[in-house]
Image (cartoon, grey):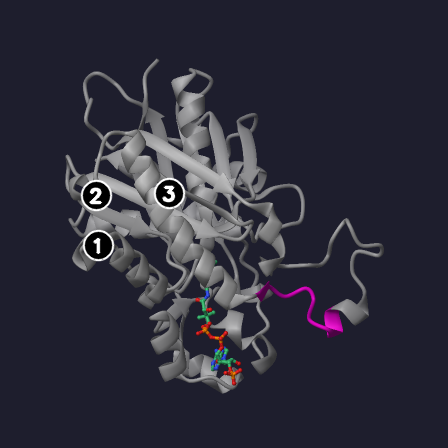
Amino acid sequence: MSGSTILGMGHYVPPRVVTNNDLAILMDTTDEWITQRTGIKERHWIEGDVGASELAEHATRGALAEAGLEPKDIDLILFATLSPDLNFPGSACLLQARLGIPGVAAMDIRNQCTGFLYGLKTADAYIRSGLARNVLLVGAEVHSTGLDVTTRGRDVAVLFGDGAGVAVVGPQTSDDPGAAHVIDTELHADGRFAEILMVEVPASRLNPRLTLEMMEAGRHFPKMDGRSVFKHAVERLPEVIHSILKRNGYTLADVDILVPHQANLRINEMVARQLGFPAEKIVNNIQKYGNTTAASIPMALHEAVQDGRIQKGHLVLLAGFGAGLTWGASLVRW
Ligand code: UT7
């Protein structure tokens, strides 16, 4: 049973840059508040009608080129997103149509900021078991059109950006035994805290699912108990990092680079302090992109590969935490 490798990656953000000062025109906020509390300086937001699958297509073309593969070589699409183009069908189906590969299995993953890691574990399992050969693993989000960009929604609206990150995951072959080998992924969830970060409506558990009154109350916008989410994040992330290292016989000293989810620079700094892990070995790009949820980890990972921070042979640790609650970590030998 062969393991899996990351054969190529791509990432894409829409061209429009929205700075903190741009947001201060729309709502009662300041560049100083956003920078101090989150580290974010700007984010990219789409213009016009652009769905997650369109951003994903751009990133996919890059990932396939890097992997030296064509769309026809893909036999499974996994699409992690909390902002699918449509309520149904899933964005994986829409991306499949864009790529012109009818018949290929396509499935959405609904695990928010941990979606890419849930997808990586699924891709790894499919490949190890021989059920798939080349899996297209996507994290893509269009947040901007779902945010309350008034002062009422400022605690959430300033955090999120649009973007896509894609990995092509394939079997480990004997002629390239060291290439970005996926060693292990550990996943967790705790649904008791589902409501501390959610979009409540439209909802099948409500009848009717959506009313004008609900919309006037802003219940179709994301709601977050930011302090509670922050507290859970800084506890769960160090825990899962210690756990995945221990079960694979590594220590933190073996890790060359940590690529965490990009929710808040302060969360990543606090996690680093708790772990005693050097800040210079952590990849952070939230300053430029904000929180792009399922796209955060693959975007940061690919940037670090492209700018040479990740080198062949490096032990790379990925870690994510988000709504669900969900969290997890992956170890990859680059
Ligand atoms: O990827 C998904 C996971 N998400 C996260 O991990 C997010 C975790 N949470 C956080 O990052 C932080 O909780 C936030 C950055 C969202 C907020 O920071 P905070 O230090 O927890 O602020 P707060 O929510 O306690 O709000 C402090 C004050 C409040 O005013 P009062 O009540 O003290 O007068 C807010 O109304 O800041 C106010 N505030 C703002 N002021 C200016 C909230 N949002 C803004 C804003 N601009 N955008």
Q: Is residue 172 visible?
A: yes
What residue does disc 3 label? 240
Disc ID at residue 276? 1
CA distance for labels 3 and 2: 12 Å
**Up/down of 235 relative to 173, above or below:** below
Q: Quadrant of residue 60?
A: top left
- The type of residue carrying mark 3 is Val
Disc ID at residue 252? 2
Which quadrant of the rendered structure holds the N terminus?
top left
Determine the secondary structure under disc 1: loop
Q: Which is nearer the eye, 175 or 129?
A: 129
Q: Which is nearer the eye, 226 or 304?
A: 226
User: Is there a contact, CB below 8 Å, between mark 3 and mark 2?
Assistant: no
Work out whether mark 3 precedes mark 2 in sequence or the reverse, and give the earlier one. 3
Measured from the top left, where is residue 275 in percent x and y? 26, 52
Indicate left or right for 65 with 83 as reference. Answer: left
User: Is there a contact, CB below 8 Å, between mark 1 and mark 2?
Assistant: yes
State yes or no: residue 149 in magenta: no
- The type of residue carrying mark 2 is Leu
| Distance from mark 2 CB to nearest ligand 1 atom below 8 Å | no
Tell which residue pokes out farthest to the right in this image: 207
Determine the secondary structure under disc 2: helix
Residue that appears at 60% across and 64% down: 222
Highlighted magenta segment, given as a residue range: 215-224
Specify the principal SS of the magenta part. Answer: loop
**Up/down of 313 relative to 18, above or below:** above
Residue that appears at 49% across and 54% down: 141
Q: Is residue 6 visible?
A: no
